[in-house]
Image (cartoon, rainbow, N blue to C red):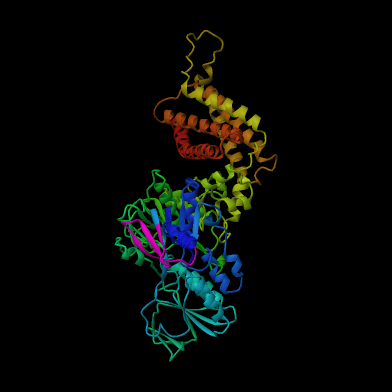
Amino acid sequence: MTAEQLKQEQTFLRQSFDIIVVGMGPVGLHFIQKMVALNPELSIAVFGDEPWAPYNRVKLSSLISGQIKEDSLYEASPIAEHDSVTPFYNDRIVTIDRYAHEVTDSQGRNFGYSKLVLATGSRAHIPVIDGVDLRNVFRFRDLHDAMSLMGRSVMTRRTVVIGGGLLGLEAARSMQRFKTEVHVVEHDLWLMFKQLDEAAGSYLQKHIEGLGIIVHTGQHVTKISGEHQVEGVHLSNKEVIAADTVILATGILPNVQLALDSGLHIGRGIRVNDALQTNDNDIYAIGECAEHEGKVYGLVGPGYEQAAVLAHYIEGKKSQYKGSISAAKLKVVGMPVLSAGDVVQLQGHVDQYVYEDKEKSIYRKLMLRNGRLCGMVGMGEWPGIQRFQEAINKRRRIWPWQTRKFVDDGVIWNHVQSENVIDWPASATVCNCTGVTRGQLDHAQSKGAVTLPQICAMTGASSVCGSCKSLIGDYLGSSAPAEPVKGFRTLLTTSMIATLAALLFLVVPAVNYATSVQTDWSLDRLWRDGFLKQVSGFSILAVALLISLISMRKRVKKLIKLWDFSSWRIVHVVLGLLVIALMFAHTGFRLGNNLNFILMLTFSALLLVGAVAGLAIGYEHNLPKRLAKNIRSFAMWSHIILLWPIPALLGFHILKTYYF
C-alpha cells in the first residue's frame, strides 16, 4: 500500500456521520426518507448485510412463481437520491462501542455517529423438529431464500409448507409453478390464526383448497424423515406426507444479537420508550427488531409509523410513539384479506356484528367495545376499507343504526363518504404498503404532483402491490374544482329566504290580538276562527306530506318521473317556505305551551336545518370539500332526528284539539 493509499484508508477509518442506520430494509429506508425531508443537511450512512440493493420483499413469491423478473424487485430509494446518504451494501455491523460512539463493520472499519438507529429487522424462526437440518429443507424470508426456492421449484414433485400464515401460503402458491403437489400444515385450528377468526379462516381455506393446495389444520409436525434428504413429513395425527421438499414459514424472531452484545436492554426485541430510544440515549430501534410496551410488531405498517416518529423526534420536534393498531390489508394468493386490531384477543370480549354473502365469498365482521370500533376482519372485496381502518385507529363511535346498516348491507357510511378519498381525514392511510396518508397526498399535490406517476414518485404510494391505485385515481379526480349543483342560484335564494323565515318564527314575538271587536276583519281572525285554523292546520299537514313524498323521489324514482332531482329539491325548499307561511296563519308566531310548545319548536327547528342544508348544497362548490360535507351531514342527520317525534306530537295535537 502506498503512502497516499494508507493516508486515504486512515482518513476513511475516522469517517463519522450524524446518523448511522443499521438495516437496509423498508423501515430503515423509510426513516431515511423522512429524515432527509426534515433536514437534508444531515450526513447519514446506512448499512445492509445483503449483497443486493434494496428490494421489495412483498414480490418475492411472485419471483418464485415466475410472474416477475428479478429486475422488477428493485426500486428507487432515498439512498440513491441524496448525496448526503452513503450506502454500504453487503457490509454487516458487528460491534457497537457505545462510549466511543462508534460502530465496526465486517471489514474492521470504524465509523463514528452522533445518533445510531437499529433497524435490523427479523429472521426466520426455525422450529425444533427432528430432521429440520436435512437437505431440501428451506426457509422463506429473503431474496437468498427466494432464489434457492426458484431452483428447487423446477425439481420438486411434492412440497410441504410448515406454517399457514401469509408467507407460508404465498410460498405454497408459488411452488405450484410446475404442477407440484403442495401441502400446507398449520398447527392452529385455522389458517392465519393471529389475523382471522374461525369463519374467515374457513373462507380462506376453501379458497386455498380451490387452487389445488392440500391444507392440514390443527396438526403439528413431529418429524421430518429421510436419510440424507427429505423423504416425508410426520404429523401429530400419525399421518405421514411423502415429500421431497419442506419450506419453513413458522414465524420470525427479532434480530437483537448486536444490541445484546452492546449491553442494550432486550426482551422479545430491543426495548424502546415512546421516543423509540433504548437505554442508551443516542441509540434507537425501529421496526421488527423493536419492542415497545412489551409488544413486537411483525408488520411493516407499525415500522413506518415508528420511523416517522423517530425522524421528527431526532429533529427536535414534539413526537411520541404510543403504539400501533395491528392492521393488514393483503391479497393472500389472490383473495383480499383484511385484519385490524388484536382479533384473537378481542373475540368473546366485545360486541360483534357480521355481514356475510356466501355466494360471493364475502365475509365482514366489526368488533366494538363500549360502542367504539376496535377490530375487524374481512374476506373478499370491501369497498372503502381504509375508512374503517382509520375509524379503528381513532376508536371512533359506531351508532346502533350504523351497525344495523352494516349487518344488512355490509357498509356503514354511504358510498361518497366511504370511497371519496378527498373526504377522508388527513391521518387516514391510503397506501398500506408504504404508509402514505391522505395528508401526504395533499402535500405532494401542493408540490406539483398531479398525476399518478408523480404521486407515486414523490410519496411511494402504489409502488408495492398497486392495490391503492384506484384510490389515488379517485383522490386526483376528487381534488379537481367542484362544480356547482344545477340551479344553485335559485336554491341559494330560496334557502336563504327559508332560513330567515324560520329564524323569524323562532325569535319574533307573537302578533297581538286585536284590541277591538268592532272592526269588520282583523289579522288575528286567522288564529281565532276555528274554521280558518282547521284550514291552515290541515294545509300544513297536506304540504308536509307532499314534502315527504318529494323526499322519497331520490330513493324511489318511479314515484315522480317529472323533472330531475335538482328541480324537485328547489320545489322542496319552496314548499318549506309555504309551510312557514301557513304556520304563521295558524299560530301568529305563538309557540304555545306544553306539548304544543314542543311540537312547534321541533317543527320550526326541522324547517331551519332543512333550509341550512339547502344553503350548504347551493354554496358547496365554494367551500372546502370536508367543510361542505360536514355541514350537509350535520343538517341531514339533524333533519332526520327532528323528524322522528313529529308524527307522534302531531297526533297528540290533533287528538287534543278535537277531543276537547
Residue 544 place in picture, x, y as percent = 56, 34
Q: Residue at x 60, y 81 (%)?
A: 178
- The front one of 143 and 499 is 143
Q: Quadrant of the C terminus?
A: top left
Q: Residue at x 46, y 62 (%)?
A: 6
- The front one of 466 and 419 is 466
Residue 150 place in picture, x, y as percent = 56, 77
Q: Is residue 81 left or right of residue 128?
A: right
Q: Is residue 242 visible?
A: yes
Q: Considering only vertical position in the picture, is 251 above or below 348?
A: below
Residue 382 painted magenta? no
Q: Considering only vertical position in the picture, is 558 above or below 295?
A: above
Q: Considering only vertical position in the picture, is 65 above or below 10?
A: below
Image quadrant in which you'd find residue 68: bottom right
Q: From this viewpoint, which residue is outermost toward the right? A: 562
Residue 613 place in picture, x, y as percent = 55, 34
Q: Is residue 356 visible?
A: no
Image quadrant in which you'd find residue 225: bottom left
Q: Is residue 511 left or right of residue 561?
A: left
Q: Residue at x 47, y 71 (%)?
A: 141
- The front one of 311 and 401 is 311
Magenta-colored span: 88-111
Residue 169 place in picture, x, y as percent = 50, 72
